Image (cartoon, grey):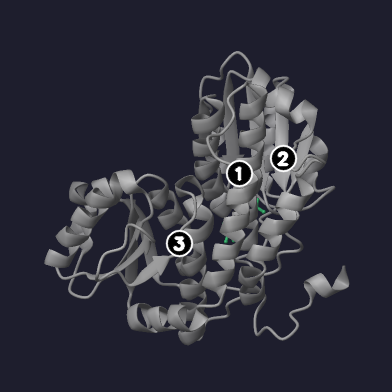
Amino acid sequence: DASDIEKGTYPHYMLKEIDEQPLVTRKIIAKYRNENGGLTVDEDIVNAVNAADRIYIIAAGTSYHAGLIGKQFIENWVKIPVEVHIASEFSYNMPLLSANPLFIFISQSGETADSRSVLVQIKELGHKALTVTNVPGSTLSREADYTMLLHAGPEIAVASTKAYTAQLAVLSILAAVAAEGKGRSLEFDLTKELGIVANAMEVLCDQKEEMEEIAKEYFATTRNAFFIGRSVDYYVGLEGALKLKEISYIQAEGFAGGELKHGTIALIENGTPIIALSTQEHVNLSIRGNVKEVVARGANPCIISMKGLEEEDDRFVLPLVHEQLAPLVSVVPLQLISYYAALHRGCDVDKPRNLAKSVTVE
Ligand code: AGP
């Protein structure tokens, strides 16, 4: 559909694509829904997942970050061990493979050369591959045994946004259906909870002024910024840091809260922005402890918490969604804050320097 690749009234594709996330989430639910209102995934794919004794997720950049969360869905729900690998490292650091591995390639474009070279390598070894991609007919889709589509519509901005949340939604559906196939139904209704996620994304997309304020307050002039979190919040922090660095050129890093004391805390200076995520009850107290430690060293904290875990000084409270789906929602303010940070620093938001949308060279 040609209208999909028009900016319309939006100043940038990135902003348009951030705004499309509620719609894309709803579309994914509809695409993976069966007549009975349950979720469905191609039987061959479910069988391939459930026949595997170990799953190897291969991806790059934002798609790699989605893989880290996908691993949680699969391990928690299907109970199959999962390893997540950066595509470009896999060839020289190939782990000892299990007897019956399944490879999952996550790639928005389906054209990432680093991922493709791993696909070629593992096909030569006779292993099976599933590609999760936004582009039907892409190289990684054609060369894999199976494909699951993201249905996110064309993503034009170099910074990936709607593809990331679509990857999480599709991986959650794959994990839920595979779990069901193993007789391990989820303790909650994923269709319903993804619907709640879509609504929460919509609420967040309506809070752009607040995000712009945060961007101006924390990122107008800073040289660097840190994202901290524990558990899945750490992985979302990695994605938040990548977004910020690629479009605003601020040196940003994501850290596991518990690692601060092992080195990173030495970087904290007066006024260093620290974005701390707290969406997971079991690590809420620990991450708040980390925030106190960095504040004592002069950091400027911006706590983003999930409703129900919020405290008085939190800068932003996320609408409540199922804890295990929190990454689909907590990433949205990070995308918007990066967008406004880049905008106010005069950067080319959709086409940041030195970057290509799909990296087709190794
Ligand atoms: C994300 O914002 C990046 N531009 C980049 O990291 C991207 O996710 C990576 O190159 C992987 O691309 P793919 O999903 O098309 O394989």
Q: Earlier in the sequence, mark 1 or mark 2?
A: 2
Taking the spot 33% from the left edge, 72% from the top edge, the residue there is 315
Q: Amino acid at mark 2?
A: Leu
- Which residue is denoted by mark 1 in the rendering? 190
The CA distance from mark 1 to mark 2 is 8 Å
Q: Is residue 140 visible?
A: no
Residue at 79%, 45% (x, y): give it. Answer: 139
Q: Is residue 264 left or right of residue 217?
A: left
The residue singled out by tag 2 in the image is 39
State the separation of the CA atoms marked 3 and 2: 30 Å
Q: Residue at x 64, y 64 (%)?
A: 21
Beta carbon of the mark 2 residue lies under 8 A of ligand 1: no
| 316 horizontally vs 143: left or right | left
Tag 3 residue: 240
Nearer the observer: mark 1 or 3; the answer is 1
Label 2 sits on a secondary structure element that is: loop
- The answer to the question of whether label 1 and label 2 lie on touching residues, with beta carbons closer than 8 A, is yes
Looking at the image, which is closer to me, 154 or 80?
Answer: 80
**Ligand 1 quadrant?**
bottom right
